[in-house]
Amino acid sequence: MNQTTFAYTPASINTKPLTDHNRLGLDYHAEADQLSFAAPIWDAHSHINTPDSARTFLKVMDLYNIEKVWSMTQLENLPALRDIFGERIEFIAVPNYYAKDEPDTFTIDWYNRIEKFADFGVKIAKFWAAPRAVDFLPGFDIQSPGYKKGMHIARDTGMMFMTHIGDPDTWFATHYKDTEKYGSKSSHRQSLEDLLNEFSDIPWIAAHMAGNPEHLNTLTQLLIDHPNLYIDTSATKWMIRELSKQPRAELLTFLEQFPDRVFFGSDIVTDDNHGADEFDLYASRYWALRTLWETAYAGPSPIVDPDLHLVDPSQPENATAHLQGQSVPASTLQNLYHDAAKNFFANIYTT
Ligand SMILES: [Zn+2]
């Protein structure tokens, strides 16, 4: 086991105004230069929405050495974002979430959109199935024939799949206490496993570490049992909170066991609603994630994590998680940050 660690103390604490994505008052421009990993990074999970926000996001990509981003973007915005990013963006097909309450959004309209995304050259389709889907789609089930029909259409166009199954343990302990309505964490994992078996010829990316950053043993078994499964490490607050708690040796063992199947991701969502804080909002995610993966920093995350107050009301509403850098060795980082996603990408664009 590589025991080298990268000691890192932010030099710019309290030099900027405090906001919910900058409780340490960091200068995210200055801190980016202090991080150690110098090679290009691919972000396999983001939601780049509008052209204006994309231009700001592109500056953050440059600052944090993000060479390429995979984005779940509204069909109508693909041409504009392609013009802004060129080859630095790839798209993942998504339903029209802006019309999520309309009855056809996840069926007829989605089937049509899959075909149009495919015409644009998109090679991955996202089948979102968080437990909270039942809040606006009563009775929603990822295994329902109507939802699966989209998978068949996507497969026929040559697409791979991405899915969001489960959610943090903190949500199952609070929002999702009603397991009759929302299911249990293990029932959602079982749904994923059923689909991985049914569509075993399709590579699947399960977002947010397949919903299990809290349970590396479960995740290890999932990856062993399903050779077509890949995961991304997106969802910044969730990953910071839970991966900081993982013993370093166990996290490194996990990453080293699956060098080709774990993709770095952020889950950054860009839009036009953030005013002057927009740059810091996006930069905070890359700063926190890169600090987690690359450094031995031990201290507060700069990002407010509402789940801390949710599970423990004695914590203030603007509490931030403890961030424990895991100092992942450079050779392992190279796989996580770049090579695994790039190899996956190269394979899907030659099939
Ligand atoms: Zn996402």
Image (cartoon, rainbow, N blue to C red):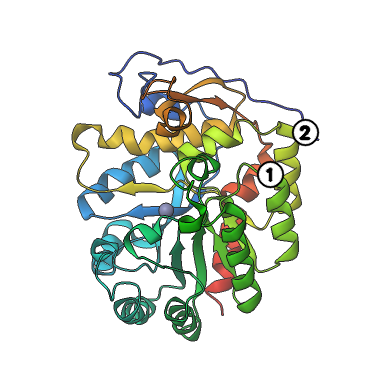
Can the viewer see residue 200 in this picture? no
- Is 319 located above or below residue 107 in the figure? above
- Is 335 located above or below residue 289 in the figure? below
Image quadrant in which you'd find residue 74: bottom left
Residue 78 placement, left or right of 148: left
Q: What residue type is labelled 1?
A: Thr
Residue 312 placement, left or right of 103: right
At label 1, counting other C-alpha atoms closer than 10 Å, the crowd grade (few under 14, some 14-19, many 20 or more) is some
Q: How many labels does the image show?
A: 2
- Is 114 located above or below residue 55 in the figure? below
Q: What residue type is labelled 2?
A: Asn
Residue at coordinates 59% horizontally, 65% vertically from top-left? 192
Q: Position of residue 146 (x, y in %)?
A: 42, 80
Q: Where is residue 203 in the image (x, y as percent from the top left)?
A: 60, 70
As drawn, which residue projects farthest toward the bottom?
156
Mark 1 and mark 2: span between their CA atoms? 10 Å
Image quadrant in which you'd find residue 118: bottom left
- Is 224 located above or below residue 154 in the figure? above
Q: Are marks 1 and 2 in contact (CB under 8 Å)?
A: yes
Q: Where is residue 156 in the image (x, y as percent from the top left)?
A: 49, 86
Q: Which residue corresponds to mark 2?
A: 2
- Kindly identify which numbered label has been placed on residue 332: 1
Residue at coordinates 51% horizontally, 47% vertically from top-left? 41
Residue at disc 2, secondary structure: loop
For marks 1 and 2, the one nearer the N-term is: 2
